[in-house]
Image: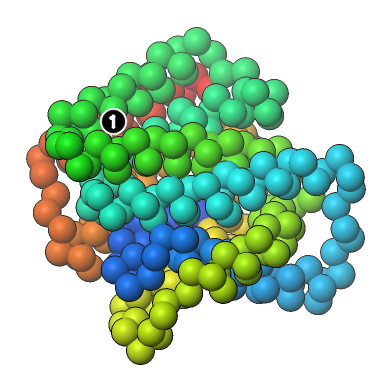
């Protein structure tokens, strides 16, 4: 019981931290290209992670852990940040946040495929209804331009679900902060090269909001949030604690409205409420 409670608490902290990621990304891509933002945040987080690994004298991952670390890198270091960065050039942060409703289902699916979990049939029914609600909202509110953003967000969610599940399974052996730190280091050479070639031509044109957003997504979204999130998934179960992601739209929509002044439609609110109710039912049957 204590282990499960600790997992839920740690997972909730991770979700709260992640809630600021999309609004911050929305601000950052005004002055940074999605490619530079993705690579720069990974480089900064990797250097911080390397410091922790060296100071705390962590042993190197084994050969069998390299492939899982690569999958974590592809999912959460490269895939999700890059695709959401491109998506936010077509849709608002408030709109993109609703897609987070697909993350619990994606994480649960990969939790079964990669983590060996077996939720009950009722869990899948609730999860599918919740995911369908999100997809329906996206289609109903899309125009020609935002369809590109919607497609990019769906792809981002799938890769993120894979990275979450893979990282959670690996965290049971390595530890949560160690997993994200090693995954960041695995991707560091490629990310550093990309950052050099996609850096802004004129640094003076980058505003303070963009710098602050880069700092947030680098330190909190890319490193600190994963320390709590992977620990939560490892302790409480990938499918079960993964349902906490449905709280993320609430936090994210509020942040987008407060800091970016983006409108929040009744459709967004209603869709989010329906999805949260579905996840509450799914949680009961994990």
Q: Is residue 160 visible?
A: yes
Can you name the residue that lies furthest to the bottom here? 204
Q: Residue at x 38, y 29 (%)?
A: 280
Image coordinates for residue 45, horizontal then vertical, percent: 60, 68
Up/down of 18 relative to 165, above or below? below
Image coordinates for residue 184, horizontal then vertical, percent: 67, 60
Query: Seen in the image, is 151 located left or right of residue 264?
Result: right
The residue wearing badge 1 is: 134
Dividing the picture into quadrants, the one containing residue 54 is bottom right
Query: Seen in the image, is 37 located left or right of residue 130?
Result: right
Q: Residue at x 37, y 41 (%)?
A: 153
Foreground of the two, 91 or 202: 202
Image coordinates for residue 208, horizontal then vertical, percent: 33, 83
Up/down of 185 relative to 44, above or below? above
Query: Where is the N terminus found, in terms of image quarters?
Result: top right
Image coordinates for residue 25, horizontal then vertical, percent: 37, 62
Q: Residue at x 25, y 36 (%)?
A: 147
Q: Residue at x 86, y 70 (%)?
A: 57
């Amino acid at each position: 019981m204590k282990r499960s409670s600790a997992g839920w608490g740690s997972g909730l902290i991770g979700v709260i931290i992640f809630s600021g990621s999309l609004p911050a990304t929305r601000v950052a891509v005004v002055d940074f290209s999605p490619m530079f933002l993705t690579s720069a945040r990974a480089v900064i987080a990797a250097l911080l992670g390397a410091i922790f690994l060296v100071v705390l004298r962590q042993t190197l991952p084994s050969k069998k852990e390299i492939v899982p670390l690569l999958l974590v890198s592809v999912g959460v270091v490269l895939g999700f940040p890059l695709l959401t960065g491109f998506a936010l050039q077509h849709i608002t942060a408030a709109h993109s946040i609703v897609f987070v409703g697909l993350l619990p289902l994606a994480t649960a699916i990969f939790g079964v495929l990669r983590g060996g979990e077996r939720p009950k049939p009722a869990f899948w029914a609730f999860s599918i209804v919740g995911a369908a609600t999100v997809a329906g909202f996206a289609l109903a509110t899309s125009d020609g331009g935002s369809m590109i953003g919607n497609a990019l967000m769906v792809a981002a969610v799938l890769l993120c679900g894979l990275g979450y599940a893979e990282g959670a399974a690996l965290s049971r052996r390595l530890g949560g902060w160690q997993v994200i730190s090693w995954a960041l280091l695995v991707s560091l050479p490629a990310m550093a090269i990309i950052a050099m070639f996609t850096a802004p031509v004129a640094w003076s044109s980058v505003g303070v909001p963009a710098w602050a957003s880069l700092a947030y997504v680098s330190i909190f979204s890319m490193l600190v949030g994963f320390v709590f999130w992977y620990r939560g998934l490892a302790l409480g179960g990938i499918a079960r604690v993964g349902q906490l992601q449905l709280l993320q739209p609430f936090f994210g929509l509020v942040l987008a409205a407060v800091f970016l002044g983006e409108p929040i439609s009744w459709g967004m609110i209603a869709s989010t409420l329906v999805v949260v109710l579905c996840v509450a039912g799914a949680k009961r049957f994990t």
